Image (cartoon, rainbow, N blue to C red):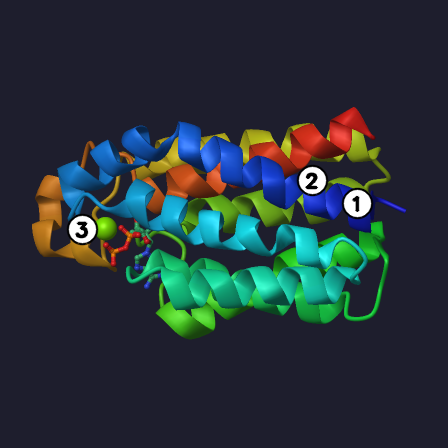
Amino acid sequence: MMMTRDQLLKVIEEITIVIEENKVHLTDLDQAIGDGDHGINLNRGFRAVKEKLESLRDKDCGTILKTAAMSLISTVGGASGPLYGTAFMKAGAVVAGKEYISVEDSIKMFDEAIQGIIARGKASRGDKTMLDVLVPAFEAWKVAFEEGESTEKASEKMLGAAYQGLEYTKTIIAKKGRANYLGERSIGHQDPGATSSCIILKTIVDVMAKGE
Ligand code: ADP
Ligand code: MG
């Protein structure tokens, strides 16, 4: 077992807190290459998710993630709400009816979440989006378990790949989203969605590490 239903609720609660803490930072990043609302968008979305948490205490992992997904999709106007919402929805479908998440589930959930983002946003790795963090992070996660690593080691490798992906977004031209209007001028700037993805992955790892 990798994560219980209670830990999943804790993950969502903690994401709400760290997104709030990073609201200005994310918005500043989006100010440079977008329209300056990424932090505001996600904060609004996760606050709506938080309001649902109490009603989810005794629900299964699939229901928890699906409910969170619907809140994100319905409250966030920007591109990131539907994209993260789709990711949560697809991940939730993997654990429908389950009260805990296994290692195998986590790999499938991560994969499905990314496939959902790609299906919805039609971006690929290298377009300077959240995918530049999520795809390498997923690959590191999957490979670590294939090589028999512990969850702790897999988490470390996954986050390492995520932060490397985040750095990479500074070096490339945006091909999707609003930043793509800037063309070459988007080089040098860190992608806001890739940044929020790192923050979310770090939060998941932190909750797992606490093992409460
Ligand atoms: P908007 O661009 O509508 O203002 P946000 O500012 O909330 O929405 O989110 C911007 C982030 O969304 C970008 O930094 C990028 O990482 C991500 N993004 C935008 N378009 C796509 C896409 N088609 N696929 C994946 N991610 C995308
Ligand atoms: Mg924006």
Residue carrying label 2: 10
Q: Local crowd at mark 2 within 10 Å, few (<14), some, or many (≥20)?
A: some
Q: Secondary structure at mark 3?
A: helix
Q: Respond yes or no on whether mark 2 lies under 8 Å from ligand 1.
A: no
What's the distance in space between the residues labelled 1 and 2, CA to CA?
A: 6 Å
Callout 1 touching callout 2 (CB < 8 Å): yes
Instruction: Using the image, determine if residue 189 lies above or below residue 44.
Output: above
Q: Is residue 87 above or below residue 203?
A: below
Q: Earlier in the sequence, mark 3 or mark 2?
A: 2
* Residue at 40 percent of width and 49 percent of height: 130
At horizontal 59% and vertical 35% (from top left) the residue drawn is 14
Observer-nearest of 194 and 135:
194
Residue occupying image coordinates x 76% and y 53%: 57
Q: Position of residue 108 (x, y in %)?
A: 72, 61
Q: For the C terminus, give its image quadrant.
A: top right
Q: Nearer the viewer, residue 100 or 10?
A: 10
Q: Nearer the viewer, residue 44 or 189?
A: 44
Marks 3 and 2 in Cβ contact (< 8 Å): no
Quadrant of the image occupied by residue 33:
top left
| Residue type pointed to by label 2 | Lys
Question: Is 11 positioned to the left or the right of 118 in the image?
Answer: right
CA distance for labels 1 and 3? 37 Å
> Which circle, 3 or 2, is nearer the viewer?
2
Q: Decide if residue 153 is on the left or right side of residue 28.
A: right
Ligand 1 lies in quarter: bottom left
Q: In the image, what residue type sits under mark 3?
A: Ala
Ligand 1 contact, mark 3 (Cβ < 8 Å): yes
Q: Please name the residue that numbered disc 3 is placed on.
A: 179
Task: Name the residue carrying label 1.
Answer: 6
- Numbered disc 1: secondary structure: helix
